[in-house]
Amino acid sequence: MLAPILNESRKARAGWTFIDGGGNRPAFDEEVAAVADLCLLVFRNTDEDIDVVTKDLIRIPKAMAWPTAWPTNPYASRAAQFKLERLMKDFPLRVIMTPIPKVDSSLQLIAKVLESPRTVVRKMARKVFEVVADEYEQRKPKGVEQPPEHT
């Protein structure tokens, strides 16, 4: 059911198509990763997330790991850095080194209407876009057009 959507998205070349694998469906994730131009495995600073992303990086060789909801407290951040460095050592060049910090305004991101989001939400959305655009640019297949402009 997803194949026609991906085909139409590729034909249109008007932006990116994001697919959230999730749901503990490894076979689905592998199929989507096989046709994706960029496969991102997001993870948080928990032992469980690190274990899962490690297994997924082994299972999906072209995937990149991306730390998200990362601690901003200096002490917690320093402790989290050790986990990140261990993962980078095990998977060189496959960990995005720009963690996305935890945003306490997440309720605004899932609201039905974003009338006037706080600056922190807009700033974080821009940062996420820039990181994805940079990673895509570094890994895009030959002959593929530029990523969309952000607004």
Image: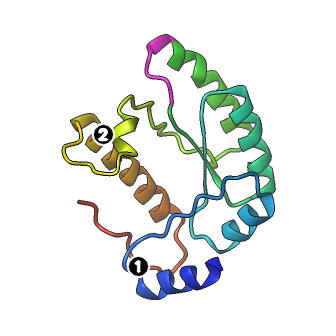
Residue 36 relative to residue 29: left or right: left
Question: Residue 120 placed where, x, y %?
Answer: 28, 35
Q: Secondary structure at mark 2?
A: helix
Residue stretch rendered in magenta on the structure: 70-75
Mark 1, residue position: 145
Q: Give me the C-alpha separation between circle 1 and circle 2.
A: 28 Å
Give the position of the C terminus as an image quadrant.
bottom left
Label 1 vs label 2, nearer the camera: 2
Q: Secondary structure at mark 1?
A: loop
Is residue 143 at all visible to an observer of this figure?
A: no
Give the position of the N terminus as an image quadrant.
bottom right
Q: Residue at x 38, y 73 (%)?
A: 146
The vertical placement of 50 against 122, above or below, is above
**Residue 116 - label:** none
Residue at the extreme top: 75
Mark 2, residue position: 121
The vertical placement of 50 against 55, above or below, is above
Q: Residue at x 34, y 69 (%)?
A: 148
Residue 110 relative to residue 30: left or right: left
For this rendering, which residue is in front, 148 or 91? 148
Q: Residue at x 62, y 31 (%)?
A: 84
